[in-house]
Image (spheres, rainbow, N blue to C red):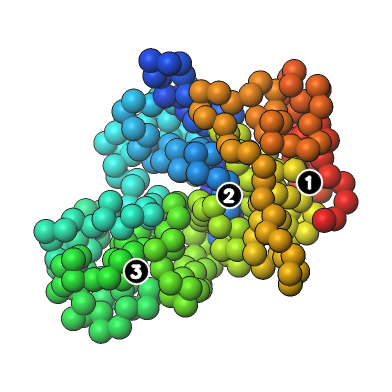
Amino acid sequence: MRAAEPLLVIEDLRVHFPTRAGIVKAVDGVSLRIRPGEIVGLVGESGAGKSVTGLSILGLVDRAGRIAGGRILFEGADLLPRPEAELRRLRGERIAIIFQDPMMTLNPVLRIDTQMIEAIRAHHPAVGRHEASRRAARALAQVGISAPEQMLKAYPHQYSGGMRQRVAIAIALINGPRLLIADEPTTALDTATQAQVLHEIQNLCRQRETAILWITHDLAVVASLADTIAVMYAGKIVEQGRLDAVLDQPRHPYTRGLIGSIPSQRRPGEPAQQIPGMAPPPLAVPAGCGFRDRCARADDQCSNVPPPVAAAAGHWVHCFHPHLDAP
């Protein structure tokens, strides 16, 4: 595979959850491309559909949901028609995921070494336990855990929340995946630990050309980590482009609102900015532009049909009235 070719291509992905009140369109036409070694930040408020997008790649959408349309191409092959047994072989080896809650990854009744060794030997059965244990200790050291050989003998409850998350990150990286899906993985970490873990993940992924889909609501984390940013709202990506282009000249009103709400963006004495209103309930997303009820630039045109795509130099936005000036 040439470096210029995308490793992951998501095309018009739609994920629906039927309910008694109607169909929840959790993901409604999402398209993304991630190249080897590239870090893409998927940003938006809670309920925007970010996590469902990430889970769809691995075929982990809750049984109540269904993929209603689109394609997910990994290394050129569509993942959606693949049987569960084939997806299971991909998970943890070619594609790995880090969950926000490390206890979704760690079994509370098994020692850390048992879980890490199993993660290795499930995909590489020829690796002996001694070699697997050595790799596990090295993986813990790479995420900043001191005395890794000793810490391998502990149970999850003997770790702090931040340490458990480091273990979850180590397990995700231990088999050298081509693609890493990180769903708010540093939320439970303090600022210093978060910075260290982000630095280690960046280094490891640059060395191995691992692609990352980093799912978060925290623009400050994305600004220090990502190459490309995709802003998601009500199941759709509303703006996408190179990190510096989007942060320096955000074109969608929602993106501007997110950036304006970051405390570090305020001048001393300036009041905190906020986006008016609330994100719409999943069953009540407005027709036309889903953001129109919270947007100061909205007019009648925004109520009728979905907004068009405006693109320039790899930076595109879905909006009838995009900002064309720097904030």
Q: How crowded is mark 2: few (under 14 residues within 10 Å), some or many (20 or more)?
A: many
Lower position in the chain sequence, tag 1 or tag 3: 3
Residue 251's label in the rendered image is 1
207 horizontally vs 268: left or right: left
Where residue 14 appears, x then y in whole percent? 52, 27
In the drawing, does residue 281 fall left or right of residue 95? right
Instruction: Answer with the quarter of the image where residue 293 lies.
Output: top right
Residue under numbered circle 3: 162
Question: Can residue 172 be seen by looking at this rendering?
Answer: yes
Q: Which residue lies furthest to the right in this view?
A: 325
> Is residue 197 something one can see in this rendering?
no
How many numbered marks appear? 3
Query: Residue 288 in the image: x percent, y percent?
Result: 70, 23
- Judge whether 98 appears above or below 6 on screen: below
Q: Quadrant of the C terminus?
A: bottom right
Q: Which residue is drawn at 47% across and 33% down?
A: 78
Give the numbered dot on residue 43: 2
Measuring 68% from the left and 59% from the top, which residue is drawn there?
Answer: 272
Which residue is at a point 81% across and 22% down the rendered structure image? Answer: 301
Outermost residue on the bottom side: it is 147
Q: Residue 321 carries which label?
A: none
Label 1 environment density (alpha carbons within 10 Å; few <14, some 14–19, many ≥20) = many
On screen, residue 307 above or below 266:
above
SS of the residue under disc 1: loop
Q: Is residue 103 left or right of residue 290?
A: left
Neighbourhood count class around disc 3 (C-alpha, 10 Å): few under 14, some 14–19, many 20 upward:
some
Q: Where is residue 300 in the image (x, y as percent from the top left)?
A: 81, 22
Of residues 18 and 171, the one drawn nearer to the viewer in this rendering: 18
